[in-house]
Image (cartoon, helix red, strand yellow):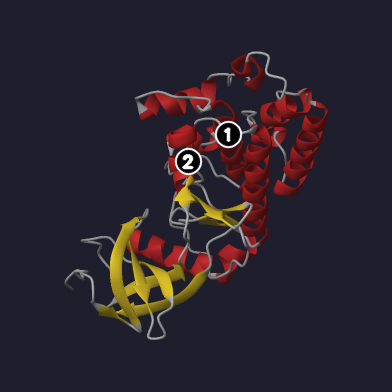
């Protein structure tokens, strides 16, 4: 079976390709339009992807997983279809900029803004976890910030490394695409248990959110190294730097905010926040503590 070649104006299903938007974990992303002129983002299989290969199965799992979700902080699935033997995922077209670009341009964010965005991320992953899905690759590159006219909404995209747990796994036949000992994810945002190739649950996503919050507050990730293997080793072994040390006495670095980040970056997942809801409660306390900052 030949790999589809994509170009503007090409017709796929009921959609017309307009322009490439970039690449996701499993393939390319295009802006497409339906016959009514509504625009969407279409995720296509990667070039050379074998329809029988594990990568294709993972792409199919992402498509089915995203269709289970319905939350304002998660990209919404609109359609899934097969053409020429390949699966295509159609998602809402998110008009915004990645958190990666925002941080590159603006540096550390104002603490209240960082906490509001982190809360939205926790709302989104909490919904995913409630539906039996663990993202496993949360990072600024996978977060779009959308201007809502006076406020901004965070949208989590790219569920290419999604893991199914509990009822969600059973609903899709219980087939496992990964084996304990294999490592998936991005080293800078990877929980220690994930770096070790151990089985992960929602607490790995919470660790990633804490890492993103740390970066929004300080302008850097807790563990940075040019060598990805060394970065994973640091995730497992090295104590994370404290926000208060990097903040250098800044008034916004309250004890509640420090306690939130410290607890969320604990190496042992059993000592972390057990759920997004519990972490949100601690985050809200940190946010309120900023009211007493001059």
Q: What is the spatial separation of the Cα atoms under label 2 and label 1, in whole angstroms?
A: 9 Å
Callout 2 secondary element: helix
Work out whether residue 154 can be spotted. Answer: yes
Contact between marks 2 and 1 (CB within 8 A): the answer is yes
Label 1, residues with CA under 10 Å away: few <14, some 14-19, many ≥20: some
Placement of 94 over or under 279, stated as above or below: below
Residue 180 place in picture, x, y as percent: 47, 44
Q: Nearer the viewer, residue 116 or 271?
A: 116
Horizontally, is 1 left or right of 91 in the view? left
- Residue 65 x/y as whole percent: 52, 65
Question: Compared to 218, does 13 lie above or below?
Answer: below
Q: Is the C terminus in the top left, top right, bottom left or bottom right quadrant?
A: top right
Say which residue appears at 16% left-offset and 71% top-offset. 2
Return the x and y of residue 208 as percentages of the image width and height: 56, 39
Q: Is residue 196 visible?
A: no
Which label's residue is closer to the chain start, 2 or 1? 2
Label 2: which residue?
A: 102
Does 41 sit left or right of 217 as displayed? Answer: left
Please report the residue visible at 73 percent of the width from the left and 29 percent of the height from the top: 257
Q: Residue at x 65, y 28 (%)?
A: 266
Farthest-out residue, front: 150
Choose between 291 and 190: the one closer to the eye: 291
The mark found on residue 109 in the picture is: 1
User: Residue 4, how many percent across, how many down?
Assistant: 21, 71
Secondary structure, mark 1, is loop
Rendered view: 253 above or below 80: above
Q: Give the residue displayed 50% in from the left and 30% down from the top.
A: 107
């Amino acid at each position: 079976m030949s790999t589809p070649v994509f170009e503007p104006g090409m017709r796929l299903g009921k959609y017309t390709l307009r322009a490439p938007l970039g690449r996701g974990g499993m393939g390319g992303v295009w802006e497409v339009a339906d016959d009514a002129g509504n625009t969407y983002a279409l995720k296509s299989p990667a070039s050379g992807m074998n329809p029988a290969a594990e990568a294709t199965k993972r792409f199919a799992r992402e498509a089915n997983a995203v269709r289970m979700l319905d939350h304002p902080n998660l990209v919404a699935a609109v359609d899934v279809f097969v053409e020429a033997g390949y699966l295509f995922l159609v998602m809402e077209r998110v008009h915004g900029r990645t958190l990666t670009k925002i941080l590159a341009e603006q540096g550390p964010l104002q603490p209240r803004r960082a906490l509001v965005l982190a809360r939205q991320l926790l709302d989104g992953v909490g919904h995913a976890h409630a539906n039996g899905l663990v993202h496993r690759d949360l990072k600024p590159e996978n977060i779009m910030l959308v201007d809502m006219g006076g406020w901004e909404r965070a949208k989590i995209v790219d569920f290419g490394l999604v893991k199914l747990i509990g009822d969600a796994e059973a609903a899709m036949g219980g087939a496992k695409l990964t084996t304990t000992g294999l490592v998936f994810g991005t080293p800078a945002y990877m929980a220690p248990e994930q770096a070790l190739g151990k089985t992960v649950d929602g607490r790995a996503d919470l660790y990633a959110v804490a890492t993103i919050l740390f970066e929004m507050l300080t302008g850097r990730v807790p563990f940075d190294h040019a060598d990805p293997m060394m970065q994973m080793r640091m995730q497992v072994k090295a104590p994370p730097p404290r926000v208060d040390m990097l903040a250098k006495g800044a008034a916004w670095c309250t004890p509640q905010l420090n306690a939130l980040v410290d607890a969320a970056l604990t190496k042992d997942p059993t000592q972390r926040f057990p759920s997004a809801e519990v972490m949100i409660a601690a985050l809200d306390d940190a946010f309120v503590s900023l009211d007493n900052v001059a």
